[in-house]
Amino acid sequence: MSISVTGTIERKGLGPGTWALVTDDGETYELQKPPEELRKSGLKVKVKGEVKKDVMTFAMIGPVLEVNSFEQLSSD
């Protein structure tokens, strides 16, 4: 399923550690192999990608989102 969401990048320390996008609505997506430019806590972004329903992870913090493209909005 293709989606476009706006939120803030966070580093989650669960398991081996993972990068997440916490949306403005409070939903958390686990980022699958995010590009280096997205690996910055506090970064405000708009992300377009695919929700991967056939992927399981150690962190299990929310749906897995494979990033197709993103736009940086700001950083804290």
Image (cartoon, helix red, strand yellow):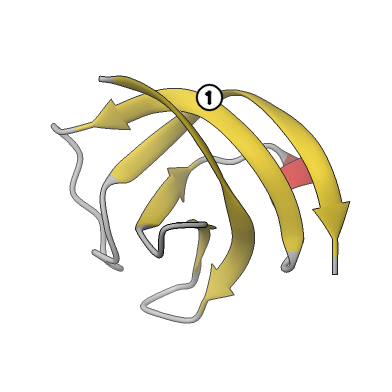
Image quadrant of residue 28?
A: bottom left
Tag count: 1
Horizontal side, residue 52 vs residue 33: left or right: left
Residue closer to the observer: 35 or 22: 22
Which image quarter is the N terminus in?
top left
- Position in image of residue 45 (x %, y %): 69, 44
Q: Residue at x 49, y 81 (%)?
A: 13
* Local SS, label 1: strand
- Residue lying farthest to the bottom in this orientation: 13
In which quadrant of the rendered image does the C terminus lie? bottom right
At 76% from the left and 57% from the top, the residue drawn is: 43
For the view shown, which residue lies furthest in the front direction?
Answer: 25
What residue does disc 1 label? 48
Q: Does residue 66 lie above or below 9 as drawn?
A: above
Instruction: Report the residue at 73% width, 53% height from top.
Output: 44
Image location of residue 59, percent across then percent down: 30, 68
Residue 56 versus residue 44: which sits nearer the camera?
44
- Pinpoint residue 20: horizontal percent, then vertical percent: 50, 59
Where residue 63 appears, as percent x and y from the top left, is 26, 48
Q: In this view, does 15 lie above or below 56?
A: below
Residue 34 position by quadrant? top right
In screen coordinates, is 29 left or right of 55?
right
Q: In this view, does 9 lie to the left or right of 74?
A: left
Crowding at dot 1, Cα within 10 Å, few <14 / some 14-19 / many 20+, comes out as some
Give the vertical position of 44 relative to 26 (above or below): above
Q: What residue type is labelled 1?
A: Lys
